Image (spheres, grey):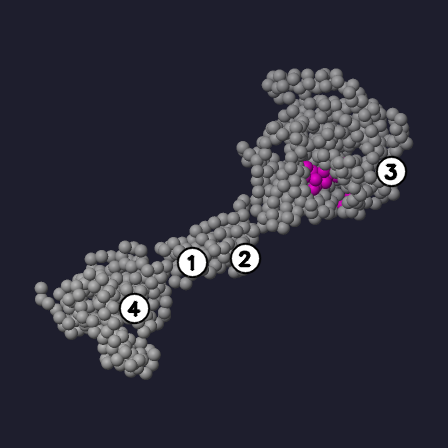
């Protein structure tokens, strides 16, 4: 009953074909369930007023139509949709094409792409390659472009009409007028051709489908959404006298089922332009012959009909993937490019575009296979997902809304490399492409944590700077594929270290001596010790001893420190503050240690008391502890603690106050384990000023506590 065309390995396909033929045979036996009684005229908008319909193209679900209508002697192309209840929208005139229509201009066949954004048609527009050429128009911004000639090698000096684009956009079926016409037939006879695109998207030389597809008078090939089922019109001996609709199916590459006549739809009139609605397997087509009645129906010059397809003629199952592509932040619909590929081989199956006005997209996907879908838009993020249609045949329509974004957030956690404390820094962004500094939105989320919002589609250089820290730079490439809207990066800024020299010498002899140097970072109260025997523990910086008594230590630029220098035995200690944030502050410290001799004295710095009180402030304890260490390291000395005041108050009051303050220091030493016999308290009041009491600064100098050596016992 059936034969195969193009079978190169019949034995390998034999079992499959027997099962296939048996299925069709059984379904044909059930043909009585579908008859001409179920064929009905399909009324498109405005056809009551303009009854001549020539051709139509329809969407996957059969609810969106583009059709040709003869209006006031000119062919016009219209677009209309119907809702679930069958109500039609007001048809839209496709002005970019209709504006070219005039007497003598004909359109022969229309076909819509899978994404419904590219329309192919044949027409004899002026300036073409031949008489009739194949053109296409693109929908952009809700408007169809002016027709674009497909050009060679598809169009020739002859006539090419009735294009049908495959669902993957890779193959174009069309009809080419035969050079020789059969004078016995009252028809214009054509042959069906197939053209494929190469990897660069260019059309290759068309190939004529051989017999038994082309028997001499064919027209209007239409490929269904399964990319395998082809309906075309042909005049054949077994037909009903004019163009009849035929069905064929691609079983493998270059292997087709022999054409089968669709008896449920054919009439003795011209049955052409068959298009299948994949959702419900309805066949839409036109029947034309002027003033001729058939089956109790009055057909005007040309009318549209719809007929249910016998199961054997139905396309393979397909699924429509639909959705809306929009901006994540604004929720506005937008246009994008959709790439359909094989997830296992990465081979691109097809590329599509959605409606850039509504954001909607509709893709017909042959069932029972795996897909990967990638969504791209210039200067926007990329989105992809894998889809298996193997278990979704019964669903028919799937919905996948996609939200793309035009900016990303870069989160920087900026902190001190050594202390792990958050830092407040300056962030600068350079647009590498334009070589200009830009001002993106930068938000401080919390101390040291910044959010930098950058537009996608460019390359950037981002630098983070903090005074007294080494700068940090990073290149960010947002010109490629972006799949995430947030990236986080920890930025550890290293402090800038500078050399600080300490020269320690005996005050009397000026000879360099070994010393222990204790440096306290006032920012975090961390202390490290420098000496000829010990180096830094690494928490602040490295230390080196150049020669005896000469030290170089690396300190943070801009830091504030307390430097204490001592020789464990035989010398008073030395204490001072160093502020490296001041440009005027020296980067070298010359320390003269006083030998511990009888009657020498040392001012105890930073010893303070409550106002008009002998109670020590806690800020005094650090200096007092140094005195404790001096007495511990030198157990053979006896000292006097001398307290002095300024001239505020009576002399008697100041003597008593200074006595009490000196005794408070003695009590602190005793509490720390120093024997009382080694300690003497003495208050001098205002009797021994070191400066005039004429300013507050000078009075502060006079309010002091001194440590004086009274005796040194020989061991």
Q: Examine the structure image and report whether residue 526 is included in the region drawn in magenta.
A: no
The span picked out in magenta is: 108-127
Placement of 81 over or under 680, stated as above or below: above
Q: Residue furthest left?
A: 715
Label 1 vs label 4: CA separation? 39 Å
* Circle nearer the N terminus (1, 4): 1
Q: What residue is shown with label 2?
A: 441
* Circle nearer the N terminus (4, 3): 3
Q: Secondary structure at mark 2?
A: strand
Residue 139 percent across, percent down from the top left: 71, 45
Label 4 vs label 3: CA separation? 110 Å
Front residue of 357/602: it is 602
Q: Residue 528 appears in which quarter of the rendering?
A: bottom left
* Circle nearer the N terminus (3, 1): 3
Q: Secondary structure at mark 3?
A: loop
Q: Residue at x 49, y 48 (%)?
A: 487
Q: What residue is shown with label 1?
A: 423
Q: What residue is shown with label 4?
A: 615
Q: Residue 194 appears in which quarter of the rendering?
A: top right
């Amino acid at each position: 009953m059936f034969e195969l065309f193009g079978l190169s390995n019949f034995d390998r396909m034999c079992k499959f074909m027997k099962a296939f033929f048996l299925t069709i045979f059984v379904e044909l036996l059930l043909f009585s369930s579908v008859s001409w009684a179920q064929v009905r005229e399909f009324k498109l908008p405005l056809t009551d007023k303009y009854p001549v319909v020539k051709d139509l193209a329809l969407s996957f679900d059969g609810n969106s139509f583009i059709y040709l209508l003869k209006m006031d002697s000119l062919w016009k192309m219209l677009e209309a949709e119907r809702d679930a209840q069958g109500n039609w929208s007001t048809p839209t005139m496709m002005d970019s094409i209709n504006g070219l229509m005039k007497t003598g201009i004909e359109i022969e066949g229309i076909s819509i792409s899978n994404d419904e954004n590219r329309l192919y048609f044949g027409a004899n527009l002026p300036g073409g390659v031949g008489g009739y050429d194949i053109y296409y128009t693109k929908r952009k911004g809700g408007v169809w472009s002016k027709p674009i000639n497909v050009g060679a090698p598809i169009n020739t000096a002859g006539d090419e009409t009735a294009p049908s684009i495959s669902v993957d956009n890779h193959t174009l079926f069309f009809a080419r007028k035969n050079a020789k016409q059969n004078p016995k037939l009252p028809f214009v006879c054509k042959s069906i051709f197939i053209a494929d695109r190469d990897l660069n998207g260019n059309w290759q030389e068309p190939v004529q489908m051989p017999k038994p597809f082309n028997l001499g008078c064919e027209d209007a090939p239409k490929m269904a959404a399964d990319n395998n089922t082809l309906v075309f019109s042909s005049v054949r001996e077994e037909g009903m006298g004019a163009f009849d609709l035929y069905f064929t199916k691609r079983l493998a590459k270059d292997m087709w089922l022999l054409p089968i006549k669709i008896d449920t739809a054919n009439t003795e009139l011209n049955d052409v332009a068959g298009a299948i609605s994949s959702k419900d397997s309805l066949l839409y087509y036109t029947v034309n012959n002027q003033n001729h009645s058939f089956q109790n129906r009055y057909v005007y010059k040309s009318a549209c009909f719809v007929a249910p397809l016998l199961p054997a003629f139905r396309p393979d199952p397909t699924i429509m993937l639909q959705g809306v592509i929009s901006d994540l932040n604004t929720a506005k619909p937008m246009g994008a490019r959709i790439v359909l590929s094989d997830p296992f081989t990465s081979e691109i199956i097809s590329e599509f575009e959605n409606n850039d006005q509504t954001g909607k997209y509709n893709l017909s996907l042959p069932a029972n296979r795996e897909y990967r879908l990638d969504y791209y838009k210039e200067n926007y993020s990329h989105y992809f997902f894998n889809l298996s249609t193997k278990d979704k045949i019964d669903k028919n329509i799937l919905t996948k809304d996609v939200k793309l974004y035009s900016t990303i957030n870069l989160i920087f956690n900026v902190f001190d490399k050594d202390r792990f404390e958050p830092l407040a820094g300056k962030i600068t962004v350079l647009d590498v492409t334009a070589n200009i500094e830009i001002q993106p939105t930068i938000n401080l989320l919390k101390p040291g944590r910044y959010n930098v919002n950058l537009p996608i589609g460019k390359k950037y250089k981002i630098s983070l700077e903090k005074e007294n820290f080494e700068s940090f730079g990073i290149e960010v490439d947002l010109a490629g594929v972006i799949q995430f809207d947030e990236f986080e990066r920890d930025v550890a800024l290293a402090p800038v270290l500078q050399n600080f020299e300490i020269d320690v010498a005996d005050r009397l002899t000026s000879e360099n001596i070994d010393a222990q140097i204790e440096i306290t970072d006032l920012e975090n109260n961390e202390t490290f010790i420098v000496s000829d025997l010990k180096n830094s523990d690494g928490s602040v910086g490295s230390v080196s001893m150049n020669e005896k008594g000469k030290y170089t230590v690396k300190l943070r630029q801009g830091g504030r420190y307390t430097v204490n220098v001592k020789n464990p035995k035989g010398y008073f200690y030395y204490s001072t503050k160093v502020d490296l944030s001041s440009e005027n502050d020296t980067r070298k410290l010359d320390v003269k240690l006083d030998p511990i001799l009888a009657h020498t004295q040392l001012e105890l710095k930073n010893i303070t008391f409550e106002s008009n009180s002998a109670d020590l402030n806690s800020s005094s304890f650090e200096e007092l502890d140094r005195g404790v260490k001096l007495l511990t390291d030198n157990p053979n000395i006896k000292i006097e603690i001398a307290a002095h005041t300024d001239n505020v108050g009576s002399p008697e009051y100041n003597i008593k106050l200074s006595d009490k303050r000196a005794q408070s220091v003695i009590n602190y030493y005793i509490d720390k384990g120093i024997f009382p016999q080694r300690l003497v308290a003495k208050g001098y009041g205002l009797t021994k000023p070191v400066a005039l009491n004429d300013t507050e600064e000078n009075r502060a100098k006079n309010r002091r506590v001194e440590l004086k050596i009274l005796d040194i016992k020989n061991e």
